[in-house]
Amino acid sequence: MIIRCALILRIAAEDAGLPVRDLVADKRDEPTALARHRAFYLARTLRADLSLPQIGRHMGGRDHTTVLHGVRRIAERVVNDTDGEARRMERLRARLVLAASMDVPTNDLVSALDAAIEAAEFRLAAVREARAKIAEGF
């Protein structure tokens, strides 16, 4: 399964409440730049087959040094868990994997993915509870 850069841009834009056109435009306001940097980071971590210049071309014709700056910025936020960045990136990754594997119309994508993530988190909680009971010996 290949996660396309267009899907990465769409998921990053939806997460930030922005249109994709803002992420590929020359806008430099903080929310737009942060969403764009998240898209760079996701593309770099999920698409090892793409070079920095290729990612830049897919995401509005950005220079490879701009992509590298964005990747490093988000990597630092993930390591330091600034504003819950590690959890956010895991959620975005999960959304991307689900979206790439599902055939869902664009306008239903966010709600379908949210429902799938919620169901997975519920199942995970049940598994953890069962594991704890087994560890306690019932």
Image (spheres, rainbow, N blue to C red):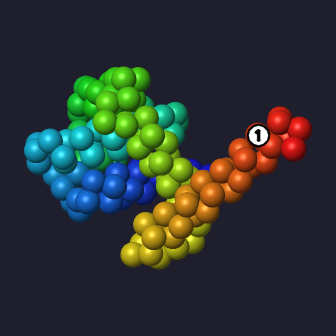
Q: Is residue 69 visible?
A: yes
In this rendering, the answer to whether 111 lies above or below 138 is: below
Is 102 in front, or is 51? 102
Residue 86, how many percent across, how many down? 43, 35
Q: Quadrant of residue 30?
A: top left
- Sort mark 1 into few (<14), some (14-19) or many (20+) by Cα contacts within 10 Å: few
Residue 118, how many percent across, how many down? 55, 60
Which residue is painted at 41% across and 23% down in the image? 79
Q: Quadrant of residue 33?
A: top left
Question: Which residue is tagged 1?
Answer: 132
**What SS does tag 1 mark?**
helix
Location of the C terminus (image quadrant): top right
Which residue is painted at 44% across and 75% down in the image? 108
In this rendering, the answer to whether 12 lies above or below 99 is: above
Q: Amino acid at mark 1?
A: Ala
Is 31 in front, or is 52? 31
> Does residue 104 appear left or right of residue 80 in this picture?
right
Q: Is residue 75 visible?
A: no
Which residue is painted at 76% across and 40% down in the image? 132
> Does residue 138 appear left or right of residue 41 in this picture?
right
